Image (cartoon, helix red, strand yellow):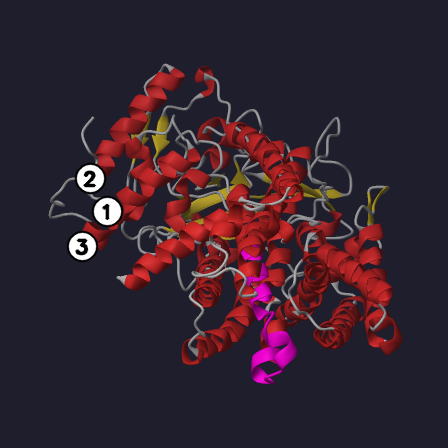
Amino acid sequence: MVNLRNFKNFITDTVGLMTTGSRLYYAWVGFLLLLIAMGGIVYAGQMRDGLIVTNMRDQVSWGFYIGNFTFLVGVAAASIMLVIPAYIYDWGPIKEITILGEMLAITALIMCLGFVMVDIGRPDRFWHIMPLVGRLNWPSSLLAWDVIVLNLYLLLNWFVVTYLLFSAYLEKHYKKNLVLPLVLLSIPMAVSIHTVTAYLYNGLASRPFWNSAILAPRFLASAFCSGPAVLLILLQVLRRTTRLKITDEAIFKIAELMAYTMGFNLFLTAAESFKELYSGTEHMVYFQYLLFGIEKNGVHYNTLVPFAWASILTGFIAFLLFLIPKTRMNWTTLNIGCVLIYASVYIEKGMGLIIPGLTPDALGEIYVYRPSFTEVAVAAGIFSLGALVFTIMLKAAVPMMLGEFTISKGRKAIDSPEADSIKG
Amino acid sequence: MTDPKPIHPPAGAVESSACGGRREFLGTAVATVAMALTGCGKLSKEEFLQHNFRELSKDELQTIIARLEREYEEKYHKAVKVGNEPAMPGVIFGYALDLSRCIGCRRCVHACVKENNQSRDPQIQWIRVLEMDKEEGVNIQHAEQYYNPEEVPRESHFYMPVQCQQCKRPPCVKVCPVGATWKEKDGIVVVDYNWCIGCRYCMAACPYGARHFNWGEPHLESADVNPATHYLGNRPRAKGVVEKCTFCVQRTRNGLYPACVEICPTGSRKFGNLLDAKSEIRQVLETKRVFKFKEDLNTQPTFFYFYGV
């Protein structure tokens, strides 16, 4: 009973922390709420008129929404880039910040589920896909698998984060024999969410672009580039704006690991390109559409070409910046590298994966897809929702992690301006 | 309005309703929350809570059909009959198309739209006719769907109509996350339009471009409505769900040919029971050289192409 009352206090105080802050905090949250509202209004239009307000059609039946979904699954999986060095190699400097990776995973998963919800034609029937109440076509459908693993991973991360913070709030040390198995479990879980998402495409023999055995390894390799890139920037922001101690050593260690995954990612991309382009079967047409464009009936279709090369080029430059110790340990070049690799993977695992998979379509038709205003606005709304979720989680978590806010400390202070030094 | 779910399932109820108690309770709870969340005010509670076609008891199905017929009558101001004829025993439908006879006139496309109540705006067509170069043979990268010459057939071209191939191993059925599409005993792959969530995974999986999505609200004039419909076939659809060719299930289960077979002016289209050794389709399979489209994918279509002359 005491625990329950404590948990109630914990929740109340968490909400309290989330809803009080500096002017800057309110401005930022307000800005995000505005973008979310805008996305919501545009989405209401989509609900009314149907998905016809997007530029998806029968030929290209998945687009920007599913592209973003796929990319964000990668970001969610990347939190284990912190867990592995921290727990497998027992490397201290990262251990204290793994919780940030888990919060990033929660955020990314919420955005993933958001993108799936806005993509389906009948959101009112979402209960059909819920285990037990609906009629989940498991184990046959990979989408059924994805629903299960994504939700389990969300639940796992949510539980670990809540438990760690609740322990800190109670000024107790967390139970190692509870947390360690769960954190270790999160490693295969992270691999599985990305593998299952890759298999979702991989299993479709009708789409040769996706029907490649190294699709899942490519998904994992690129995820371990883009996710940590977000974290690296975030860690730098947090150590400036909060009293969180994040050592240079920790950041450089993550950057070093990223250099390996980036190299591996480039290698896999090269392996795939070689196989397609050298053998030059009729299946090459999708790669050709992506990299060089194709000509049909005198029209040259090359919409994706600049994006594809931008992705390869930025990926390569970022790899060099991370590989060379001098540029890796220079904040400017490191951050440039982070932005470049993020952009590279965003293109590669988003539109660069979905669109050439579906173009030319099953009957050879070329439909040039570009996201419509609705798609971009709704996506902006979902990204803002993610930013909001992450902001308010950090807002409450940071003072608890620092031990500045516990059941006995700082509780009254949340209304006073001194406590506002923590910004989201 | 009576509740479509009887408290005591009748003796003839489908087996899966055995675990209905818990599911029903959870379903109602989830549905109520969902309705509040998605704000689907127009949606009736009955429609919202309706279960998958294959889980419905006879009584439930009758109630649903009565509701659908009432809704269609309100919407189109004419009586629409929604049938639910099951597959006939001893029948597996097969289809064969003679590529040497087809002239690409697209009469089949239009007859199909007329028969199957497809949306006229935006337009949905279940049959796509590909114009191919004779030089290239069956090569979809050289196919043109939007050919529009004065006269067909065009010199040095041949025509290949493509519709659902009613595969024996349908990838669309395999991938559907909610079991909203399945293969019936007579070989027809059908969709439960009231269960489909509109995720379009089946469209990505189909190698024949045979599945079509209602991107917008389907528009169908009252005068254009074909009132003889089937629950799993040509009854008018709603936006946000996938639809496809059903070999005109509303006709073929009543002994008629599909509309495309009947309209074809060149007799290129052959249809019949694969289990009947004397059927025309079996004659074609035994005497002609047939091929299956994209055979390497091992989808095993029951739709064959052949060169009759």
Residue marked by disc 1: B24
**Disc on res. B5:** 2
Q: Position of residue A112 (x, y in %)?
A: 55, 53
Left or right of residue A209, residue B23 in this image: left
Which residue is at the front of the view, B270 or B239? B239
Q: Label 2's element?
A: loop
Q: Residue at x 29, y 62 (%)?
A: A2
Tell me if residue B136 comes above or below residue B230 in the rendering: below
Task: Give the alpha-carbon distance from disc 3 to disc 2, as whole Å.
Answer: 13 Å
Q: Please state which of residues B13 and A422 is positioned toward the viewer in this rendering.
A: A422
> Which image quadrant: the N terminus of chain A?
bottom left
* Image mark for residue A314: none
Which of A177/A115 is in front?
A177
The magenta-colored residue range is A85-108
Asked if A371 appears above or below B285 in the picture, the reply is: above
Taking depth in this image into account, of A152 and B139 the one nearest to the observer is: A152
Q: Which of disc 2 and disc 3 is earlier in sequence?
A: 2
Q: Chain of mark 2?
A: B
- Write down the residue under mark 3: B18
Q: Secondary structure at mark 1?
A: helix
Q: Amino acid at mark 3?
A: Ala
Tell me whether the residue at label 2 lies in contact with that at label 1, contact meaning CB atoms closer than 8 angstroms. Answer: yes
Residue A403 appears in the figure:
yes
Residue displayed at 58% across by 47% down: A388
What x and y, as percent, mark residue B57? 20, 44
Q: In the rendered structure, the residue with mark 3 lies on which chain?
A: B
Instruction: Give the amino acid type for the residue marked by disc 1 in the picture.
Output: Glu
